[in-house]
Image (spheres, rainbow, N blue to C red):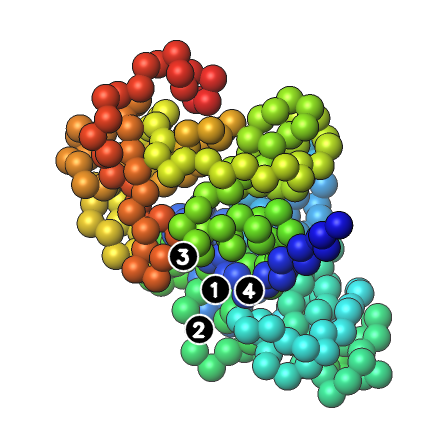
Amino acid sequence: MTAAAPPPEVLRAPLVVEFPFTRSLGPVQSAFLTGLRERTVLGVRTEAGQVLVPPVEYDPATAAELRDLVEVGTTGTVTTWAWNPEPRPGQPLATPFAWVLVRLDGADTALLHALDAPGPEAVRTGLRVRVRWAAERAGAITDIACFEPHDSTADQEARDHDGTFEDPVTGIVAAARLDYTYSPGRAQTRYLHGLAERRTVGERCPSCAKVYVPPRGACPTCGIATTDQVEVGPRGTVTTFCIVNIKARNLDIEVPYVYAHIALDGAGLALHGRIAGIPYDQVRMGLRVEPVWSDDGRYPDHYRPCGEPDADYDTYKELL
């Protein structure tokens, strides 16, 4: 009787998903952000007379377009809060702070932002606060550096405002970022260890017999564990593809290039891969390809034609 092999070490690695995107602003959002640059907080009045801060372009109750801008106070009241003991990169403050919803004087809704406080004991619902403006402002929500406690009374009402400023902000770049630690689990860990040996290993469902690459540890169709490991490839067939004409940030690949779905021999579904070694306009469905491994040998850098005749459509039509 032989001892079972120990399970592979489960891998973990930091992962950052980041996608800054540019968006244009309508008249309401443009006035709101330009106002912040000028130390002015604007809201919008609904058909029912409520003042919404931050302003929206359509009435949440009636869906009517809203353009009736009003100026509200820079002081307000905390309606609810949560303490943040360990600020993350990119958050408003580098020291522990409270996330707060603040109903500014003259507004009927609350604005989410950070409150600079020495500790959670200094924060409470009903606390009076005021805006702390950033030293340099460019027309963004970060023009409000944070809120800070302030001894004041709510004595300001919303005042009509035409939303007109010099040099209005018409567009912004929104930095979307997700920073976390990723663990691929046992199935994908075995897959990654296989790639390190220049092998592509999938897992077969014991019910439907489909081989999943990369494996997920369970068959999404049958809902049962996939423990039978199967080596597939290394060659495969291009099933579908697209031509990329926009250069991605931090990606040193000249455009245009081709990104394709590739059904490796023996696999039950196609995976993604870049096609090189052939002019982009000669890539086609059915093209037979083989992997070209990265310099460190940890994964296929791209796939290239292997010289075999194109695959017949009937051999891969179920993998489109």
> Which residue bears the numbered disc 4?
13
Per the image, label 2 sits on a secondary structure element best described as: loop
Relative to 31, residue 305 above or below: above
Badge 3 or badge 1: first in the primary sequence: 1
Relative to 92, residue 62 above or below: above
Across and down, in percent, residue 120 comes to 80, 80
> Which residue bears the numbered disc 2?
137
Identity of the amino acid at label 3?
Answer: Arg
Per the image, label 1 sits on a secondary structure element best described as: loop
Badge 3 or badge 4: first in the primary sequence: 4
Camera-side mark, 2 or 3: 3
Identity of the amino acid at label 1?
Answer: Ala
Q: Is residue 279 among the parts visible in the rendering?
A: yes
Camera-side mark, 3 or 1: 3
Camera-side mark, 3 or 4: 3
The image quarter in which residue 243 lies: top left
Residue shown at the point (41%, 29%) measured from the top left: 265
Across and down, in percent, residue 297 comes to 36, 57
Between the C-alphas of marks 3 and 4, the distance is 15 Å
Residue shown at the point (71%, 59%) measured from the top left: 110
Between the C-alphas of marks 1 and 2, the distance is 7 Å
Per the image, label 4 sits on a secondary structure element best described as: strand
> Which residue bears the numbered disc 3?
298
Cβ atoms at labels 3 and 4 below 8 Å apart:
no
> Which residue bears the numbered disc 1?
140
Cβ atoms at labels 1 and 2 below 8 Å apart:
yes
Relative to 79, residue 152 above or below: below
Q: Is residue 261 among the parts visible in the rendering?
A: no
